[in-house]
Structures are given as C-alpha cells and as structure tokens.
Image (tube, helix red, strand yellow):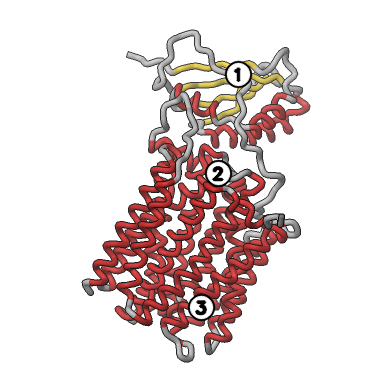
Amino acid sequence: MKETPTALLPLQGPVFRMLWLAWLAANVSMWMNDVAAAWLMTSLTDSPVMVALVQAAATLPVFLLGLPSGAMADIVDRRKYFAATQLWVAVNAVMLCLCALADVLSAQLLLTLTFVNGIGLAMRWPVFAAIVPDIVPKPQLPAALALNGVAMNMSRVIGPIVAGALLASVGSAWVFALNAVLSVAAFVLIVRWRSEQKASALPGERFVGAMRVGLQHVLQSPRMKAVLVRIFMFFLQSTSLTALLPLMAKRMDGGGAGTFTVLLAAVGAGAIVAALFLPGLRERFGRDEFVRYGTLTHAAMSVAVAFSPNVWLALPAMFVAGMAWISTANSLTVAAQMSLPNWVRARGMAVYQMALMGGSAAGAALWGQVAGWTDVPTSIVIASIAGPLVLLLTRGLTLQGGADEDFSPARPANDPMPAIDVRADDGPVLITIEYRIDPANAEAFAAVMQETRRARLRQGALSWGLFHDTEVPGRYVETLVDESWVEHLRRLERFTAADVGLRERRWAFHVGDGPPMVKRYVSQAMG
C-alpha cells in the first residue's frame, strides 16, 4: 500500500478532513466575495484609494475585534462559536446578494457590507486556529497548518476563477449569490462536527479578564513578540501587490476581469505547489531563513509584476510570489502556534491575526494613497523596497531561539490547602515563595527569576516581584498577586511541563532545608 505523503497525512483524520473541507468552502466564498467586490468597486469609482479600501474594509475588523473574538473562543464551546461565526458570514452574504440583485449597491454601501463581512472573519479565524492543534497530533501540526494554507490558496484559485467567469458572463450579483450558497454549506459542515469539551472544575473565565490574560500572555512571550513584528511588517509590504492588483490588471494589454482573475489564481497556484514541498524544506531551512528569503523573493516578484506589460509576463512572477507568500506566512504561523499553550491559543492567535490584518489593512490604505499621489508601479516599488529594509533594521529578532516549549499539562509542586473558608471570589491573593541561595550565585539566580517573572505573568498573575532580605544575605522572597482565589486556582491549572523545567532550574539554586517555602494570603476586607 502506498504511503501517504507527509504533507497530506493530517487529512487521514476524519475530523480534520471535514473541518478542512468546511474551511475550504468558507474561503472559496470569501475570495469570490472579495474578487467581486474589488472589481465592482472599479466600476463604481475611479479612485485608487476607494479600490484599495475594499481590502482594508475586509481586514480592519480583524485588527479591531481579534482579541475579543479570541477571548470568546477560549471561554465558550468552540464548536458552537465556530458555527455562529460562519452563520454571521452567511447572513451577510445573503444581504449582499439581495442588494446586488436589486441594483442598489453604491461604493459606500459596498464598503460597509465588506466591513460587516470582515467582522465575521474576525470572529471566525481565531477559533479555527485554536481548534486545529486539538484535532491533529503535534508532529502533524506544521503539515496541518500548511494544508490550511493550501485550502486558503486553493480558494484563491477556485474563487477568483469562478468569480471571474460569472463576472464576465452574468455579472457580480450572481457571484454574491453563489457566495451565499457556499457560506451556508460551510455552516452546515461545521454544525455536523461533534467536539468534546475539556472538563474543568473551575467556573468559566470572565470576558474582560480573559482578554487581559490573553494580551498579557503575548506581551510576556519574547518569541510571540518577534512573530508579531514579523507578520505585521511582512503584510504591510506584501499587501501592496494584492490591494492594487485590480488596477494593474486594467493597465495591462487587453486587461479586464479575466486578467485580474488569472493573476489571483497564479498566486494561489504558487502557494499550493510550495505547500506540498514545505515538509522537506523545513528540514533544510529554519523559520528565520524562510521569512528572510520569502520576503526578499516576494518583493522582487512584486516589482516584476508592476512593470509587466501583459499578463503572460506577470503570471510567472505572480506564481513565484505565491510560493514566497505561503512559505513566509506558514513559518510565522507555525512559530506562533508553537509559542502558545492550548488554554490561551485562541487569544494568542487572535493577537497574531490582529497583527497580520493590521499590517494588511494599513498596507492597503497606505499603498493606495501612495498610488494616488504617484502611480501604481511606483507605489509597489516603494513597498517592495520597504520589506528588505525592515528585515535589515530588525535583524536581531528571531523566531527560533531554542527548541519549542513543552506545553503539556503538569501539576504545580504545592497544591493549595486552605485551613480557612475561602470563597471563589475572595481576593486579591498574595503568594510568597522564600528562597535561600548561595550569594555567589546571585547573578545567575536573578536571570532565572527574570524568566520566572515572564512565566508567572503569562499564566495570568496581576503582578510579580522579587525582594532581597537586607539582613540575611542569600535570602530572597518572590511575591505574586492573583486577582481572586479562583484565578489563583486557574493559574495553577495552567501549569505545564515547561513550567516544571523552569521550577527545577529555580530550585537548583535553593540551599535551604527542604523546598522553598510557599505561603498564600487572601485579602482581608476592612469595615
């Protein structure tokens, strides 16, 4: 029996396969909608800014609403939330279809409905990003993420081709009609999935607190911060090509809706081909190299497209640009996923998507404005120069920095056993840990405690401190504060194997009798 290629292995799992098909259908409908909206805008207005704002309107909601959406996806049933987000997109697709059939779409109304559709995408993406690591084995995660990229880029081929054919034959209204049908089909597939909720003895997190902890976790993760800078800057540069593509297609010899469609399809085809080779390429190149070479290649191909007089010269460049795009984006997505434990994954990936879409929306608006001041080729050249320049200025940022952390659940060393009656909402809670170390090791101990500070805050602690006894050399007291007793228990529930390793490194400095002494104090209400 022929062995399944590594790149396709996750599709053997029935749950991933079904959700992957739903993701494909959802993204085909998204691309059909975006292509039809972008092309329709060129007939409603001659302004390069308004044309570029179609992409900005589609992506800006993800930047604005990504974190609230991620918080919801981490604290509610992910299957139901995923279905609800797709239902939102389907309802908006039906409204857009009806407006198009009634011939009442103006440039402003089109932008508004595109923005509303973007709200659905903002809600949908974080929950799907969080679901994937739950349904595939960890060794298959990079391949599964690459297959998600394949689905997105197959949709980049299928969606524009179908949309282009309909645009050329029966008009944009019927593109929106088919988009509505596919959106509803994706919703039905998601509803069919039966997930298993992971039980917890603790009550669910509160919405605002969940957002605080999610943002705090990302800000205390050096690798996630590097990923966020990289993904924002890459999409700020690379979006110039896609945002201005309708105008470039019109400028080419014989350019029209078909030219625009074929160019978009070439990007998707290049991404699909590259995704099939990514597992082998990962054995030769690191994530930082993928980002570096991918950014440079995409910039060079963008310039080539900008000065192509016809579609035949532009197509090979668009194909290679698609290969560079998925190689860069997939490497950054894998780096982000590997930097997040499951309990905060949706929130972390929401922040990641906010950075991605923020870069895309800012890039679309920026390069559209630059094109208005100058011309389309000049705007793309300036954007392409900016990409390598940013790489040079941020060369110290790395996506690797050692092996990926082990986020499998573990138990802390000291389970709380209160001798008094403590209610869930009592707090704040002060925790102290006393260490006795050899003063000669003070500098090395401080370095480990700096890592400890980041780890405690990533788990959700409100504050952290380390105090040195002025009378006893080598005596240190670590303090941290949790919002309430239930949040303290929740933080302990988030303990992972990586935290165990860090704890062992801390305790290696301790020279006292027995392990470091842990004390817990609950705030006393004063009359």
Q: Kindly check if marks 2 and 3 are in contact, taking CB atoms under 8 A apart as contact.
A: no
Of the residues tagged 2 and 3, which is closer to the observer?
2
Q: What's the distance in space between the residues labelled 1 and 2, CA to CA?
A: 32 Å
Q: Position of residue 522 (x, y in %)?
A: 46, 17
Give the quarter of the figure containing the N terminus.
bottom right
| Residue matched to label 3 | 263
Q: What's the distance in space between the residues labelled 2 and 3, CA to CA?
A: 34 Å
Secondary structure of the residue carrying numbered label 1: loop
Q: Residue furthest front?
A: 1
Other-residue count near label 3 (Cα within 10 Å), few / some / many at <14 / 14–19 / ≥20: many
Left or right placement of residue 261 versus residue 411 in this view: left
Query: 312 above or below 124?
Result: below
Of the residues tagged 3 and 1, which is closer to the observer?
3
Q: Which callout, 1 or 2, points at the residue further toward the start of the chain?
A: 2
Q: Amino acid at mark 1?
A: Asn
Q: Amino acid at mark 2?
A: Ile
Q: Position of residue 333 (x, y in %)?
A: 58, 54
| Residue matched to label 2 | 135
Query: 209 above or below 310?
Result: above
Query: 446 above or below 102?
Result: above
Secondary structure of the residue carrying numbered label 3: helix
| Residue matched to label 1 | 414
Other-residue count near label 1 (Cα within 10 Å), few / some / many at <14 / 14–19 / ≥20: few
Residue at image x 66%, y 16%?
Answer: 471
Q: How many marks?
A: 3
Residue at image x 54%, y 49%?
Answer: 16
